[in-house]
Image (cartoon, grey):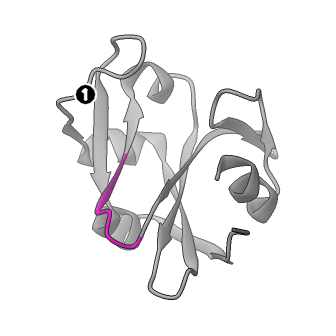
């Protein structure tokens, strides 16, 4: 989903195995969650090097609403996940509601199947 989300917001992925990207002069991470998923997670290590979290949350019918949330705001509102991430770093979770309340809606897109 990251390549499709990157194309939708005009970001450039930094590699083929990461959701990290550049968007203009900012470093971002691209996250997505289906309609039944209530939060997205980002490792603490990644939060230290990005400016924003771009998250796309699914709605019924296959449409995704995209939000941008500053990394500092993500950190302020996150709760810890039981997961330690792929490399053993902690993972912080932030709910869809935080993105809706404190983030900026940046558009919608419908991913290709």
Task: Indicate the position of residue 42 as horizontal and vertical percent values.
Answer: 41, 36
Residue that lies at the very extreme toward the bottom in this rendered image: 61
Residue at the spot x=63%, y=40% of the render? 28
Question: Mostly what secondary structure, the magenta segment?
Answer: loop
**Side of 15 where 90 appears, left or right:** left
Q: Which residues are magenta?
A: 35-40
Task: Indicate the position of residue 64 as horizontal and vertical percent values.
Answer: 56, 74
Task: Indicate the position of residue 14 as horizontal and vertical percent values.
Answer: 77, 29
Residue that lies at the very extreme toward the top in this rendered image: 87
Residue at the spot x=34%, y=65% of the render? 96
**Side of 29 where 74 appears, left or right:** left
Residue 81 magenta: no
Residue at the spot x=67%, y=77% of the render? 110
Please tell me whether residue 32 is drawn above or below residue 104 in the rendered image: above
Q: Nearer the viewer, residue 104 or 88?
A: 88
Give the quadrant of residue 85: top left
Please tell me whether residue 11 is drawn above or below residue 13 in the rendered image: below
**Side of 112 where 49 appears, left or right:** left
Q: Which residue is mark 1?
A: 83
Residue at the spot x=49%, y=48% of the render? 70
Please tell me whether residue 3 is drawn above or below residue 26 in the rendered image: below
**Side of 37 where 103 appears, left or right:** right
Task: Indicate the position of residue 63 as horizontal and vertical percent values.
Answer: 58, 81
Q: Count the marks: how many?
A: 1
Residue that lies at the very extreme toward the front in this rendered image: 113
In the rendered image, the quadrant that contains the C terminus is bottom right
Please tell me whether residue 80 is drawn above or below residue 86 in the rendered image: below
Q: Tag 1: Cα neighbours inside 10 Å, few (<14), some, or many (≥20)?
A: few
Q: Secondary structure at mark 1?
A: loop
């Amino acid at each position: 989903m990251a390549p499709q989300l990157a194309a939708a917001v005009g970001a450039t992925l930094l590699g083929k195995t990461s959701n990290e990207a550049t968007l203009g002069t900012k470093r971002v991470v691209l996250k997505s969650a289906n309609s039944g998923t209530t939060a997205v997670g980002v490792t603490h290590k990644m939060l230290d090097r990005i400016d924003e979290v771009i998250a796309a949350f699914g709605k019924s019918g296959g449409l995704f609403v995209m939000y941008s949330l500053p990394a500092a705001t993500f950190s302020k509102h996150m709760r810890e996940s039981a997961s330690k991430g792929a490399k053993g770093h902690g993972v912080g979770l932030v709910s869809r509601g935080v993105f809706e309340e404190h983030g900026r809606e940046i558009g919608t897109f419908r991913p290709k199947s």
